[in-house]
Each structure stands twice: as C-alpha cells, then as structure tokens.
Image: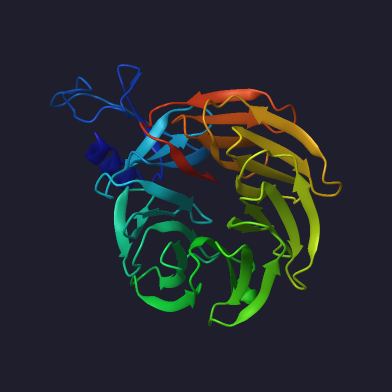
Amino acid sequence: MLSLRRSISKALQLPHLTLLFKGYETAMHHTLKDAGLENHSEVQAVPVTEVALASASADGMVYIWDAISGKCLETLRGHDSKAVHCCVFSASGRLVGTSSTECAKVWETATGLCVCTLEGHKDWVVSICFNATENLAITASLDCSARLWEVSSGRCFQVLPGGVSPIFWACFDPEPENQEVATASADGTATIWKQTGEVQQVLQGHEDNVVMVSYSANSTRLLTASQDRTVRMWEALSGICMREFRGHTDTVQSAFFSGDSRLIVSGSLDRTARIWETKTGDCLRTLAGHSGSVLFAIFSADSSFVATSARDSCIRTWDTKTGRLQRIFEGHHGKVNSLSFVSF
C-alpha cells in the first residue's frame, strides 16, 4: 500500500493523501491483499491539508500522522529496526530528518523515500535539525560532537567539538543571516556557535546535564532543559539567563517556545508536561495522563495545541488554553522519543 500511495502522491503532486476503499481507510495496511484490493479496484485519493505530526520511536519506526484526525499518513522505514532517537520536519515540510544509533537520514515527505544518509559520527546520533532554507542539517551525537551537513550531497563540512562531553541536542538559529547554531551538552552548558566553528556564547548556570536547547522564533532567546529539573531562558546576544522555570520533580527532557514566544512547554521524566508563561515564569497548566516518563513536548505550528510523547509508547495532544486532552495516538511498540509538527 505504501508504494501505491507514493505513486499516487507523486502523480497528483499532493504531499499527503489518504486512500479510501469502499469508504474505509487503507493507510495502515501493508499489502494490497490486506486492504482487500484486487486488480482494477477503485480507490479514492483524499488530500490531507491539515496539521502533520511526526513521531520517532525506539521500535525503529517513524510515523507521520494527521494530527487532527489521528490517522497515520506515512511510515518511514530504513533504520534497520534500530531505535530512532529524533525526527524533525524541515520548515516547509518538504523534508523529514531522522537520527538513529549509527546515522541520520533525510527523507522526502511526499514520497517517503530516503534521499540522503548522513554518516560519520562514532556513536549514537541523538538529534537532527534543518536550517531555515533547508539546504543544511545539523546532528548531535554521544561521540561528543555536532556535525554540519550539506543536504544535497550528504557531505559533512564542519565538526563542532564537545570535548569529552556528549552533545545531546543541536539546532539552527532560525534567522538565516546569523549563521549560528546551538548545542546542549553533558558538561552542563549550552553553546552558541558560528557555523564556521567559532564559539559565540557559552550558557552556564545549570547544575547538571543540559539535554536540549531551542530558539525562539525571532532568534533573540533560547531555552535549555536540564537534568537539574529546570528550564532556563537566555538572551541570545548576551548569554544572560533571563528566567528560571522550576516545578518539575525530575529531569526536564524538552523545552520549546510557542510561536509568539509568550508560552513555553516542557516535558519531564516526572510523567508530566507543563505550560509556562515566559513573562512571569508562572506554570499555567500541568498536562498529566501518561503512564510513563514524558520524553518530548512541543507546540503545534499555531500553538493552539501541544503534543507529548512518553515511555508508555503513546502520543497525546492537549488544548493549550484549557489543558484538556484532545486525542491519544497509539501504534508504536516502544517509547516515543521525539515529535515534530508541520502545517500543509
């Protein structure tokens, strides 16, 4: 069924579509026979123009979901059943990046085909991110380095050394003219680098490993999430810590700004996600319901809802304003390590 859907998607030039046979969804079937199809069977191609959500799991699978309906739109296979640590859409949604035990991969969203494999790290590749113009990618690895890559060729053109400390996360400054990236490290710091390798700022203050760093949409601020159970907000230009967010009772695994930077969402091993107000530092809502540690929490593109993933193999979406649970996504058979949103 995947091959059929990819062929139709390419022919119709539709990035995502759902195939219906006799009114029933066929996306989760692996073969034509399983879907009840024969030669000359008529199927209906329905374009999807809603919000897509990608999920990466320890079961070795990456699923792309319709975040509104909960339907699985695409399955990306290619990491040889090894745990997938990270997944991320490019800004336009044209590409998906994934990272695993031994490499990172870049996929074409419309076809589900792997267009590039990024090889060179000596240990687990734990994160991947694209720049705003989608021609570059950055990866972070437990081999104590981050690497910058040309997407078109798969060539590594810069290695950012982390000394003796593993690097857990790396991301691009969303402002292309700045040509900067940020990394989060096991030495308790985050570092802002020029893409040419020069250190611009070292963000110091956490009392334990920094496991994630992320930028605000206007690139003026950053967030760091740490094993010291806190989130910190920093001014990018000066490297000054502007605010500390306390309330989680275990490691904070992720932290992201909303689109307008008024809110922050954090996910923690204490099995909750929290929504915070950046101006005051107040916790506005606690999102509880997962039966395992929350490994990732992120806002949708319009910040109207939040998605969380956890060790319980489930994904949940929540209304940002009310904190109410909207939907539970089930299908993975291992912890769900990472999520990414894009709107089509």
311 or 172: nearer the viewer? 311
Q: Which quarter of the picture shows residue 284?
A: top right
Compared to residue 87, the image places residue 334 above or below, namely: above
Give the residue drawn at x 18%, y 28%. Answer: 32
Measured as percent of width and height from the top left, residue 83 is found at 34, 46
227 or 319: nearer the viewer? 227
Give the residue drawn at x 69%, y 39%. Answer: 248
Measured as percent of width and height from the top left, residue 178 is found at 64, 75
Seen in the image, is 97 located left or right of residue 308?
Answer: left
**Please, which colouring scheme is shown?**
rainbow
Is residue 304 something one can see in this rendering?
A: no
> In the displayed image of the protein, which residue is found farthest to the left?
39
269 or 181: nearer the viewer? 269
Measured as percent of width and height from the top left, residue 162 is found at 51, 72
Q: Which quarter of the picture shows residue 321?
A: top right
Seen in the image, is 154 located left or right of residue 225?
Answer: left
